[in-house]
Image (tube, rainbow, N blue to C red):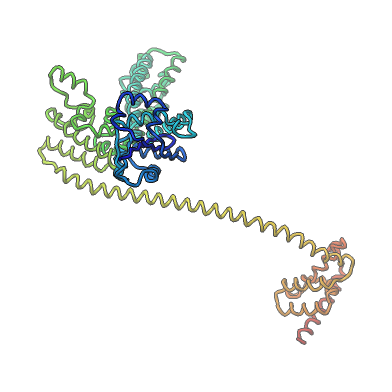
Amino acid sequence: MVLLHVLFEHAVGYALLALKEVEEISLLLPQVEECVLNLGKFHNIVRLVAFCPFASSQVALENANAVSEGVVHEDLRLLLETHLPSKKKKVLLGVGDPKIGAAIQEELGYNCQTGGVIAEILRGVRLHFHNLVKGLTDLSACKAQLGLGHSYSRAKVKFNVNRVDNMIIQSISLLDQLDKDINTFSMRVREWYGYHFPELVKIINDNATYCRLAQFIGNRRELNEDKLEKLEELTMDGAKAKAILDASRSSMGMDISAIDLINIESFSSRVVSLSEYRQSLHTYLRSKMSQVAPSLSALIGEAVGARLIAHAGSLTNLAKYPASTVQILGAEKALFRALKTRGNTPKYGLIFHSTFIGRAAAKNKGRISRYLANKCSIASRIDCFSEVPTSVFGEKLREQVEERLSFYETGEIPRKNLDVMKEAMVQAEEAAAEMARKLEKQEKKRLKKEKKRLAALALASSENSSSTPEECEEISERPKKKKKQKPQETPQENGMEDPSVSVSKPKKKKSFSKEELVSSDLEETAGSGSLPKRKKSFPKEEPVSDAEEAANRSIPKKKRKFSSKEEPLSSGPEEAVGSKSSSSKKKKKLQKFSQED
């Protein structure tokens, strides 16, 4: 007998239920359908076999995305393989979504069923699910459903394919509105300032330039030769600047008060700022169109392409339209009026604003508009479904329209579409390879910078860690040096000699000496105990070697003098003479020792 199981997907996890031995025909009776609403009677029909809860909300979102796309998730695969019988032919699995049922049947081999009695059972399971699973309350189940619904909707909005098109739609709508507003405000400035300077309207035609001049001139009686250079900068024409200056001197306008002039200048400055913002918005629109629809922009222009996308609703919708719809897009009123009155249908809609139709002759306007709509449809599909955005195809399509236009005028046969598209494919591949190389270089640079940054951080951390023990060693060495100096100073203060001091002093002398012979002699003399006599010496004018020896020998003398609180320069001339004689005697003794060695 075939066992019927039912798979139920909930926000908290998967549930696998088994139906007891009940005939399928009897389940479709109205009385049995009413029993689904009763929990006690529903328990007699369905029992819970297994329940697999989700570990987190992220896992629940992944499973919900997998079910909506018709993909068998690993959690669902594990549940079915673990709890369904091994004999797959004797198992019939009921699912609510045909897509996931087909995926289960293809990957796992279980026969799946949807609709009919399965829908009624799933309705009862959805109603009594919190009673079938132990530990699950109705409130917690509702919270889980609400949280999963929010995260699923957020993910769908985040991955909306039309989200970039929305910026273009809003930008072109705002651009059109700004054009209308700037035109209205400029006409107001012309009328308002024209009371004071009516001749300026005939000289300057541009609205933004007129508002800048009205803001700069102010009272026309104050306009003189000094402001002529600034007028040339604003008008970008020396003749117009000169004409404005001449007209201001012989103007028929009325005088204006200071408060009225302030209000006119304030309103003019706002119109100028709006025109500047309009320029920046147009630049932004061009950059967005080059990113989203580069081929359509290269073919028909950024403004017309953006209007087509805005009228269609999105780039995807525009790509789905046939060329005949693209041709009359924007002329729906004229089309339905023509159909109603059985007149001529319109030949073009928004694409009329492109330069191609204006350049064509009157008899060829319909033909070129049909050809242009065909190319626009191709360009929109390339932009919508290509992975790497490129303007190569748009440029080639524009060349084809140019050739078709020249064919209508001169009869020159254009190139075939197949040849043009082959050239475009080659160039597009080269452009894609170049873009890939640039992206790879940028990635390498980024990784290199990141590596350098991490290396610098590691070096800084290692220096900080190594500096701590070094500081500790320095701190421990400082008191040791002080302890060594104390026993050297104490015997000198008492006027007694210490053998340890006498041994350590020649070592210092050896380090200061330059000649090895003199240093060896000093060591021998130190061993013989002649250091007390050397302490009294203070040579001043001797050869280089003797001066060095004397300087080395004079170190203990200085210590003795400082310890006894005497200045080293307090010695008289007698001491200097005695030191000279003693140094000569010591020199003779050193020569004797060297000869003996």
Specify whether 351 is left or right of 591. Answer: left
Quadrant location of the C terminus in the rendered image = bottom right
Point 18% across, 22% down: residue: 335
Point 74% across, 77% down: residue: 519
Choose between 251 and 179: the one closer to the eye. 179
Q: Residue furthest left?
A: 411
Q: Residue furthest bottom?
A: 596
Q: Position of residue 78 (x, y in %)?
A: 39, 45
Choose between 443 and 282: the one closer to the eye. 443
Q: Position of residue 119 (x, y in %)?
A: 32, 30
Quadrant location of the N terminus in the rendered image = top left
Choose between 206 and 418: the one closer to the eye. 418
Specify whether 239 is left or right of 330. Answer: right
Task: Name above or below for residue 222 compared with residue 134.
Answer: above
Point 89% across, 68% down: residue: 495
Q: Residue furthest top?
A: 254
Choose between 248 and 478: the one closer to the eye. 478
Q: Can residue 509 be seen in this snapshot?
A: yes
